[in-house]
Amino acid sequence: MKVTVVGAGAVGASCAEYIAMKDFASEVVLVDIKEGFAEGKAMDLMQTASLNGFDTKITGTTGDYSKTAGSKVAVITSGIPRKPGMTREELIGINAGIVKEVTENLVKHSPDVIIIVVSNPMDTMAYLVHKTSGLPKERIIGMGGALDSARFKYRLAEALESPISDVDGMVIAAHSDTGMLPLFSKATRNGVPVSEFLTDEQRAYVIEETKVGGATLTKLLGTSAWYAPGAAVSVMVQSILCDQKKMIPCSLMLEGEYGQNDICLGVPAIIGKNGVEKIVNITLTVEEQLKFAEAAQAVREVNGDLKF
Ligand code: NAI
């Protein structure tokens, strides 16, 4: 099955690499607007195939969407990333135009496509794709929670001084520094609540470092991260192509779930061959419910800046 990745920059190329390395797709098509860039990235990646042992074919094109025809999944990473000190929300002006145009091109050539939205501000970009693509809501999925949950687990393992494979945890709500909601109440170490092991101070540290995880990396790197975002997308694409039905927190259009309507926000969902197979309702504490509603309010304000 064919996967298209639009934007052959840091995140797009990392995503294509992880998908190819796992060898579950027949073809990955990279698309970029910069002349020759996607073709170059595709060729470089293809030259790793014999070294890394994969058969996935990777091709690149400068904006020829006919090459993407028949894609099962398309990942949108095109747009500008943030620089140190910027919020994701500040990217809306440039990225909204790019995401809208890219979506139109993708749907024209692959009407049955499932779109994974990565470009920031991601919850708002996912909402834009819902409003402009004409695709059913099950086929539009925003990537944020998978990455933020991986960052949460990293910080939990660090605080617990434990292997990462022993910890589990999930981040829902908005993909923003203030709107992220790491579900500490449900985080576990080998099935035991982590509150058994961590002090209030450590709890506050884990939550804060998770929320500013992207900003911390942007400060260190001078631009936003790419390895973990690429890996997070590849897990979502694999769950669709291999119909794994993994439960992954994703930014989805809510119609009453978690008390919200007409908004894309991060919630746990079963991801399989049809895209979103089911939104999973988990019980939140009163404090978590309030934080979820606050995050929704902030995303709604950013959505208000969209022009369709
Ligand atoms: P980048 O600058 O390395 O790559 C973006 C690529 O998009 C560039 O190669 C550019 O030429 C291309 N592009 C721009 N307009 C295009 C168009 N109309 N058609 C096709 N390609 C086009 O940026 P990076 O680091 O890969 O980040 C991409 C986006 O992903 C940013 O908006 C960033 O904020 C977001 N991001 C989202 C994450 C998430 O968790 N949702 C995590 C990390 C990044």
Image: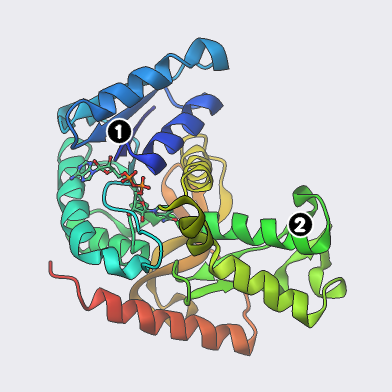
Residue 47 drawn at (x, y percent)? 43, 13
Residue 153 location, quadrant: bottom right
User: Is tag 2's residue or tag 1's residue first in the polypeptide sequence?
Assistant: 1
Q: Quadrant of the N terminus?
A: top left
Residue 232 drawn at (x, y percent)? 52, 47
Q: Does 250 sit left or right of 27 as displayed? A: right
Q: Is residue 183 visible?
A: no
Residue 138 location, quadrant: bottom left
Q: Amino acid at mark 1?
A: Ser
Placement of 203 over or under 143, stated as above or below = below
Q: Is residue 61 visible?
A: yes
Residue 276 drawn at (x, y percent)? 44, 54
Residue 5 drawn at (x, y percent)? 33, 37
Residue at screen point 39% across, 71% down: 254
Mark sitting on residue 283: none
Q: How crowded is the residue under tag 2: few (<14 C-alpha within 10 Å), some, or many (20+)?
A: many
Placement of 137 over or under 5, stated as above or below = below
Residue at screen point 47% across, 42% down: 230
Given the current orientation, which residue lies at the most extreme top position?
50
Q: CA distance from mark 2 to mark 1?
A: 35 Å
Report the residue marked by disc 1: 71
Report the residue marked by disc 2: 167
Judged from the image, the secondary structure of the residue bearing numbered disc 2 is strand
